[in-house]
Image (tube, grey):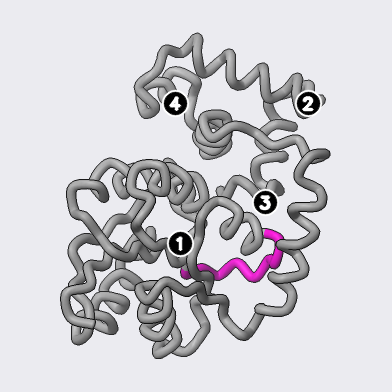
Amino acid sequence: MLGTRVILADDHILMLDALRNLLEPEFEVVGTFADGRALVEAAPQLKPDVIVLDIGMPLMNGLSAGQRLKRLMPAAKLIYLTMNQDQDMAAEAFRLGANGYLLKHSAASELVAAIRQVVRGGSYVTPLMTEGVVGSLTNHFKKLKSTNYLTLRQKEVLQLLAEGRSMKEAAFILNVSPRTVAFHKYTMMDHLHIKTSAELVQYAMTSQLVAV
């Protein structure tokens, strides 16, 4: 599929190099990124057909980045390549717009097959977890109305605070005022019935919606 434009995003440089070497004989790799925020800022100008990204990335995790990218460029296909074997996490990725989900210890040829599949309009889930993901996705939609979902901006604030950023630093990264960050922080704490900042960070580290 020469001419298929692919972007790679992973915070491990060696992984990016390996993926580029794997894919370039068949696809055109037009950009590589080590954090989710840089990916979101640059991807629209690169006009990729497929974006291969990890879930656990700094500044903005892959789920939040993917959700933003789908809004900015709905035609782009998202394939998550991750160490995370949590079936509910995979279900959440598809709920937010993923077209594929693979594990990093899957066979290298599987990523090539997944890209071919999503470019043709299909979806791809690694056989290592297909059955569980289907079940989790079904249960996910059943629980949708009763689950306390955070907004996309709240997830971004939550990740930055969980990474140890101050509210002022988070405000600078998100290009908002510190007061806005504080508003989101305390709104989340009230919404989640959390009383301390430490509990909020703990929630971020165990949440299936925020990768830290």
Q: Decide which of tag 2 and tag 1 comes sooner along the chain.
A: 1
- Residue at 69% across / 70% down in the picture? 133
Q: Which of 196 and 53 lies nearest the eye of the viewer? A: 53
Q: Position of residue 129 (x, y in %)?
A: 66, 78
For label 3, the residue is: 208
Observer-nearest of 41 and 122 = 122
Q: Earlier in the sequence, mark 3 or mark 1?
A: 1
The local crowd at label 2, few if under 14, some if 14 to 19, many if 20 or more residues have their Cα within 10 Å, is some
| Location of residue 3 in the rendering, given as x and y in whole percent from the top left corner | 16, 74
Circles 4 and 1: CB distance less than 8 Å? no
Of pointers 3 and 2, the one earlier in the residue sequence? 2
The image's mark for residue 194 is: 2
Structural distance between the alpha carbons of marks 3 and 1: 14 Å
Please name the amino acid that badge 4 sits on. Answer: Ala
Q: Which residue is mark 4?
A: 170
Query: Label 2, label 4: how many angstroms apart (C-alpha)?
Result: 20 Å
As helix, strand or loop, the secondary structure at mark 3 comes to: loop
Up-down: is 90 above or below 66? below
State the image quarter where residue 145 is shown.
top right
Which portion, as a residue range, is magenta? 81-88
Left of 208 or right of it: where is 112?
A: left
Q: Which mark is residue 54?
A: 1
